[in-house]
Image (cartoon, rainbow, N blue to C red):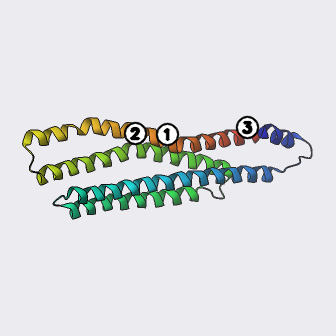
Amino acid sequence: MELEILKKELNKDQPKYSRQEIQSIFEIKTKRAVGSMNRVMFFDLIIMTMLATAMIALTFIINLQDRYFISLQILLVAGVLYLHYAIKRKVIYNQLSNNGIKNSIENILYKMNVYVNIYKGLVPIIICSIYIKTSVDIAQSFKLSNELYWGILLTTLPFGYGAYKLTCWLANRLYRPTIERLNQLNNKLFKAFK
């Protein structure tokens, strides 16, 4: 409905809104969508921090022999994930530039789609790496037999597949609504200035 009103205003001899005002309306909506995406990214970061904390606590609860080294590895992964979040947030906010709102939306959409695809691939790999490392450490700490040790490692494949499916579901649940909203804004903007 908004789009039709804006198009009518543009087609009038003396439109109620100037092209600049319409563009600023779309810019405000885009900033809201990006703000929403930022909240989702922050929520995602909180989930990752809670998981890292739980994993570190688990190493101390199980009383693993190398718990400090394992905890350091988990903290290193959490630090990399935080750095990734900070860079991603800065890159997305830098897209809201003076290059025009349409270019900004297209750049944000491109970067978010790339991010979601990397997220879907990288998070399961990190989870599987931590799972394998923890399994090896547990097997060595409790001096498990070789058969049981290999049995634990063979569970990595179904665990990895489950982690991939969960990550895809989570990524779609968290990021897809905002990406769809930006796609709609982009389409409306394209139709408004046709």
Name the residue that disc number 3 marks. 191
User: For the residue carrying disc 3, how many other residues have a C-alpha within 10 Å: few (<14), some (14-19), or many (20+)?
Assistant: few
Residue 66 image-quadrant placement: bottom left
Measure the C-alpha gap from mark 3 to mark 1: 27 Å
Residue positioned 67% across, 38% down in the render: 187
Residue positioned 42% across, 57% down in the render: 84
Residue positioned 47% across, 61% down in the render: 86
Name the residue that disc number 2 marks. 166
Label whose residue precedes the other's in the sequence (3 or 2): 2
Where residue 49 appears, as percent x and y from the top left, is 40, 57
Return the mark for residue 10. Answer: none
Label whose residue precedes the other's in the sequence (3 or 1): 1
Q: Can residue 139 be seen in this snapshot? A: yes
Residue 165 image-quadrant placement: top left
- The kind of residue tagged 3 is Lys
- The kind of residue tagged 2 is Leu
Measure the C-alpha gap from mark 2 to mark 1: 10 Å
Measure the C-alpha gap from mark 3 to mark 2: 37 Å
Disc 3 versus disc 2: nearer the observer: 2
Disc 2 versus disc 1: nearer the observer: 2
Contact, mark 2 vs mark 1 (Cβ under 8 Å)? no
Q: Is residue 87 above or below residue 5?
A: below
Where residue 193 appears, as percent x and y from the top left, is 75, 42
Q: Is residue 22 left or right of residue 12?
A: left
The quarter of the rendered structure image containing the C terminus is top right
